[in-house]
Image: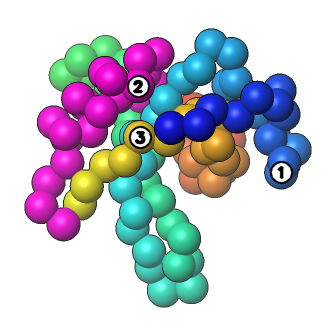
Amino acid sequence: MALPNTPFHPRGHVLHTRPALFVLVNYAPGEGQPNWCNASCEFVEEGDADAGSALAVHISPFDALLNAAFVSSPGKPYHVVHAAAFDPRTLIRDSGGTDPG
């Protein structure tokens, strides 16, 4: 997996570039949204949904691949994406302008 070397994203935003971080996404196209993906989020406090959730990130691509294998299900595979290539704006907008949760 080639990692971006630029400190900025071509669409004008940065999630992270250094250190290299990885997120899990699954392709879930919908009507009018052919490129829609869902990002993997986890509870901030395990087992406490009221505490909210946050985007799950991994420092190691190997750990990300292991987690992707664990959370994937038939017909809903998760893929590892370099965080600098991930556009978080829709995720933030859909979460009321904050981190998910």
Q: Amino acid at mark 2?
A: Pro
Q: Position of residue 101 (x, y in %)?
A: 46, 34
Q: Residue furthest left?
A: 74
Q: Residues within 10 Å of mark 1 (few under 14, many from 20)?
A: few
- The magenta region covers 53-75
Q: Is residue 34 above or below residue 47?
A: below
Which residue matches tag 1? 11
Q: Nearer the viewer, mark 1 or mark 2?
A: 2
Q: Secondary structure at mark 3?
A: strand
Q: Position of residue 98 (x, y in %)?
A: 63, 34
Q: Position of residue 49 (x, y in %)?
A: 29, 30
Q: Mark 1 or 3 closer to N-term?
A: 1
Q: Secondary structure at mark 2?
A: helix
Which residue matches tag 2? 61
Q: Is residue 46 above or below residue 74?
A: above
Q: Mark 3 or 2 closer to N-term?
A: 2
Which residue matches tag 3? 80
Residue 67 on the magenta span = yes
Q: Amino acid at mark 1?
A: Arg
Q: Residue at x 25, y 55 (%)?
A: 77
Q: Residue at x 57, y 47 (%)?
A: 91
Q: Is residue 92 above or below residue 20?
A: below
Q: Amino acid at mark 3?
A: Val
User: Spatial distance from mark 1 to mark 3, Cα to Cα?
Assistant: 20 Å
Q: Is residue 20 above or below residue 33?
A: above
Q: Residues within 10 Å of mark 2 (few under 14, many from 20)?
A: some
Left or right position of 35 against 80? right
Label pair 3/2, CB-CB below 8 angstroms: yes
